[in-house]
Image (cartoon, helix red, strand yellow):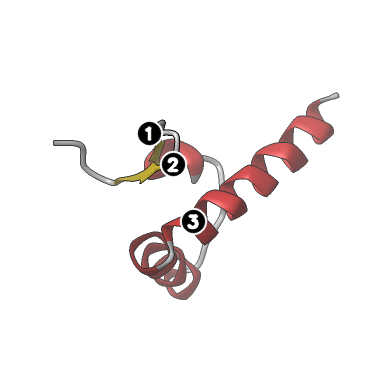
Amino acid sequence: MYHNSIDITTFDRYLLRINCNKSEDGLKTTPCSQCTLNALAIDEPLEYARLYSEIKKAADCLLR
């Protein structure tokens, strides 16, 4: 069993596993915003995945 990760299964039976520790690495949060991220990952995993995707794209653009 994986801890601090979310699993999303697509209709094509692909499994998307997001490691929350890695996805939030380097992200500066307050206790309140961290609590909000945790709730989002638990209650709305697809929205968390979308947010993760947007943060990753922004980080990739900054590194270019």
Given the image, on which type of amino acid does mark 1 rest?
Answer: Arg
Residue drawn at x 21%, y 42% is 3
Q: Nearer the viewer, mark 3 or mark 2?
A: 2
Task: Using the image, tell me which numbered label, if any, was put on residue 4.
Answer: none
Tell me the distance, in whole angstroms, between the alpha carbons under discs 3 and 2: 11 Å
The C terminus - image quarter: top right
> In the rendered structure, which amino acid carries the disc numbered 2?
Thr
Instruction: Residue under label 2, please give it.
Output: 10
Residue drawn at (37%, 63%) of the image: 38
Identify the secondary structure beneath mark 2.
loop
Q: Residue furthest front?
A: 12
Amino acid identity at mark 3:
Leu
In this picture, is 44 found above or below 15? Answer: below
- Which circle's residue, 3 or 1, is located before the other in the chain? 1
Indicate the secondary structure of the residue bearing disc 1: loop
Determine the image quadrant of residue 43: bottom left
Q: CA distance from mark 1 to mark 2?
A: 5 Å
Q: Residue 13 has which mark?
A: 1
Q: Secondary structure at mark 3?
A: helix
The picture places residue 60, in percent across and down from the top left corner, at 75, 31
Mark 1 nearby-residue class (10 Å; few <14, some 14–19, many ≥20):
few
Q: Residue 36 appears at what percent x and percent y? A: 45, 72
Q: Position of residue 40 (x, y in %)?
A: 44, 66
Residue that carries the numbered disc 3 in the rendered image:
46
Q: Residue at x 57, y 47 (%)?
A: 52
Give the spatial CA distance, label 3 vs label 1. Answer: 15 Å
Q: Residues within 10 Å of mark 2 (few under 14, many from 20)?
A: few
At horizontal 63% and vertical 43% (from top left) the residue drawn is 53
Above or below, 14 against 11 in this view is above
The one nearer the camera, 63 or 6, is: 6
- Look at the numbered discs 1 and 2 and tell me whether their residues touch, using CB distance below 8 Å: yes
Horizontal arrangement in the rendering, residue 62 relative to residue 34 (left or right): right
